[in-house]
Image (cartoon, helix red, strand yellow):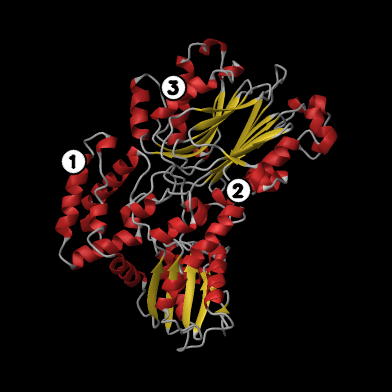
């Protein structure tokens, strides 16, 4: 993706089901669990580059020794690497020779592990905002470690209700609020005085989780060793698991579990939406439904961009996205294959690019298809740009180009990206530097449809002003003297905000309905075109119909359709519209 979009976090839960001596004999180290957790986090590092945290809990730690260890990092660069280095220094170099009977007295050696990678969305960029979160008690079974991949739409309501009940969340971010909400449910459980066991976990979760509106995959570890992984009823956030006689593991991505434990795709299961995977202190495992059945709305952006493309299903789906674009791309180049070079924006668009080339070769058997990596991203470049004035001048050079392939004034240049959200990088960096090659036409192709609506379940797309598609809509309304429609929609949204969430409607959809799809796309193309560009700029977007055909089973497409899976989604979109209109005079449309 060309824009720097911050997105979902990653969770990793690991429970050892045998004594530490077993792993020392078989694998040569009592730190087997920690070493596998390291790998699980490394294999998901794409999901979180603002913060990292690891917690380890021992089941039979003798009194006088900490029964859990927790460390976090929000280092400005590579927090996961910083975290692992800190823990490595604390463990020492002799982990492989550590006797198993002494292991529990050493840092980060235990039977239960919880890891988290954070990509900041709307919260603070600080150590306090990193997970796992912890509520420590002198009574182990009343302590709770929690980490999750979530964004809630009703945190303000939860915060108010907790405060009015005498509880004191230390911040308004959802991780802190959910921790306090869980602890409140524990306190109100009939046998809370003796501490929580696996037997109690389903009833505790059933008493509190229905209050949460949003997408979530949450791991909780009680101090006695009883643990759970809970997924939202719509399946918005991903979660996968595997267990055998040695381990129980859960993570945000299936391929990470496969790689770390050398498993086939079929070995790793998807955690059913609305269910909790519960692991008791004795290592027994059970699955239990916690939330009522709801419409399945798995996040489609997981497949387009977020998750790594080495998962067998995701790889196939991304190739299908590229194939689905071919007809519209051919129309944009007037079917002139001979004078067209096909390329992509590195790195996540590569799989879709391969799908596009597959279909091109099928459509034109025996004809030469010209393809190359034209755009080259300098991953290190931004770190050298210090002040804002210099950044403005140097920003275009975040990308470089391959010279000598595009024939000046003769060739079309097709460049595939996986999505176009804000458009800043395309306008300020990609198009200016591609134009240096002097193509007669540049076609930007997006493997996803235009992002029309803000997200409230994990992605950094909170305001309409950030979305190039909405800016194009406002530009069209302004051009056609139809801003009264915008004002009317905002009035309706303002009235809706006084209603219960389930009674609201998405008041923005009616504005997009005023214009045909291609009219909006053409306006987006004009907004993306910087001044002094010599090439003709055309824009091709995926359609929602082709998206559904390419990625069956993942219908969480609210970014494109405005069809939010939970009632709180319409509150978020209406509030975003009201906020936009309140400040519209400050924007040059």
Q: CA distance from mark 2 to mark 3?
A: 32 Å
Say if residue 304 shows up in the picture.
Answer: yes
Q: Tell me the number on the disc at residue 545.
A: none
Out of 43 and 73, give the one closest to the viewer: 43
Q: Secondary structure at mark 1?
A: helix
Q: Residue at x 33, y 27 (%)?
A: 160
Q: Earlier in the sequence, mark 1 or mark 3?
A: 3
Which residue corresponds to the image point at 40% horizontal and 77% vertical from the top-left?
Answer: 332
Q: Is residue 484 above or below residue 125?
A: below
- Does residue 45 lie above or below 12 as drawn? below
Q: Position of residue 399 (x, y in %)?
A: 52, 70
110 or 324: nearer the eye? Answer: 324
Q: Earlier in the sequence, mark 2 or mark 1?
A: 2
Q: Which label number is shown at residue 207?
A: 3
At numbered mark 2, what does the secondary structure look like: helix, strand or loop? loop
The residue at the point 53 percent across, 39 percent down is 130
Q: How many marks?
A: 3
Residue that numbered label 2 is attached to: 44
The picture places residue 383, in percent across and down from the top left corner, at: 54, 60
Please give the residue where the numbered disc 1 appears in the rendered image: 495
Q: Report how far apart the C-alphas of labels 2 and 1 lie in the structure.
A: 42 Å
Q: CA distance from mark 1 to mark 3?
A: 32 Å
Q: Secondary structure at mark 3?
A: helix
Q: Residues within 10 Å of mark 2 (few under 14, many from 20)?
A: many
Picture layout, residue 365 above or below residue 299: below
> Earlier along the polypeptide chain: callout 2 or callout 3?
2
């Amino acid at each position: 993706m060309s824009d720097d979009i911050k997105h979902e976090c990653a969770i990793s839960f690991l429970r050892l089901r045998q004594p530490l001596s077993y792993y020392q004999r078989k694998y040569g180290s009592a730190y087997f669990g920690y070493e596998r957790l390291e790998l699980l986090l490394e294999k998901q590092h794409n999901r979180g580059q603002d913060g990292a945290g690891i917690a380890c809990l021992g089941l039979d730690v003798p009194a006088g020794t900490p029964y859990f260890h927790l460390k976090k990092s929000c280092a400005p660069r590579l927090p996961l690497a910083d975290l692992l280095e800190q823990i490595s220094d604390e463990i020492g170099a002799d982990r492989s020779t550590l006797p198993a009977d002494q292991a529990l007295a050493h840092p980060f050696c235990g039977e239960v592990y919880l890891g988290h990678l954070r990509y900041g969305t709307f919260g603070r960029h600080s150590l306090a905002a990193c997970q796992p979160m912890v509520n420590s008690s002198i009574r182990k079974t009343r302590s709770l470690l929690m980490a999750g991949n979530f964004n809630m739409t009703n945190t303000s309501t939860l915060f108010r209700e907790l405060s009015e009940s005498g509880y004191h969340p230390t911040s308004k971010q959802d991780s802190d609020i959910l921790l306090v909400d869980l602890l409140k449910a524990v306190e109100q459980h009939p046998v809370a005085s003796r501490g929580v066991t696996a037997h109690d976990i389903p009833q505790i979760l059933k008493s509190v989780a229905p209050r949460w509106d949003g997408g979530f995959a949450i791991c909780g570890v009680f101090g006695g060793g009883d643990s759970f992984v809970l997924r939202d009823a719509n399946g918005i956030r991903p979660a996968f698991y595997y267990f055998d006689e040695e381990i129980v593991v859960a993570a945000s991505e299936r391929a990470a579990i496969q790689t770390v434990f050398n498993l086939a795709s079929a070995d790793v299961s998807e955690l059913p939406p609305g269910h909790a995977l519960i692991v008791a202190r004795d290592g027994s495992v059970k699955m239990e439904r916690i939330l009522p059945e709801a419409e399945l709305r798995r996040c489609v952006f997981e497949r387009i961009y977020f998750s790594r493309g080495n998962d067998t299903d995701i790889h196939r789906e991304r190739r299908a996205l590229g194939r689905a674009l071919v007809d519209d791309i051919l129309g944009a180049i007037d079917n002139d294959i001979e004078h067209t070079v096909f390329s992509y924006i590195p790195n996540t668009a590569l799989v879709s690019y391969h799908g596009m080339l597959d279909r091109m070769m099928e459509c034109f058997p025996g004809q030469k298809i010209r393809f190359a990596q034209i755009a080259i991203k300098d991953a290190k470049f931004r770190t050298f740009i210090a002040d804002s004035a210099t950044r403005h001048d140097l920003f275009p050079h975040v990308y470089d180009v391959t010279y000598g392939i595009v024939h000046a004034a003769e060739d079309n240049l097709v460049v595939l990206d996986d999505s176009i959200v804000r458009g800043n990088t395309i306008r300020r960096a990609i198009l200016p530097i591609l134009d240096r090659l002097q193509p007669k036409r540049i076609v930007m192709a997006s493997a996803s449809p235009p992002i029309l609506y803000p997200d409230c379940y994990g992605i950094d797309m909170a305001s309409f002003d950030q979305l190039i598609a909405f800016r194009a809509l406002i530009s069209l309304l302004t051009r056609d003297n139809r801003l009264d429609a915008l004002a009317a929609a905002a009035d309706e949204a303002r009235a809706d905000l006084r209603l219960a969430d389930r009674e609201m409607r998405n008041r923005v959809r009616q504005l997009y309905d005023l214009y045909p799809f291609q009219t909006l796309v053409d306006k987006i193309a004009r907004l993306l075109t910087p001044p002094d560009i010599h090439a003709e700029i055309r824009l091709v977007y995926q359609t929602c119909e082709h998206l559904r055909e390419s990625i069956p089973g993942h219908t969480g497409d609210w970014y494109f359709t405005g069809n939010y899976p939970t009632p709180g989604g319409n509150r978020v979109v209406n509030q975003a519209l009201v906020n936009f209109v309140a400040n519209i005079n400050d924007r040059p449309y």
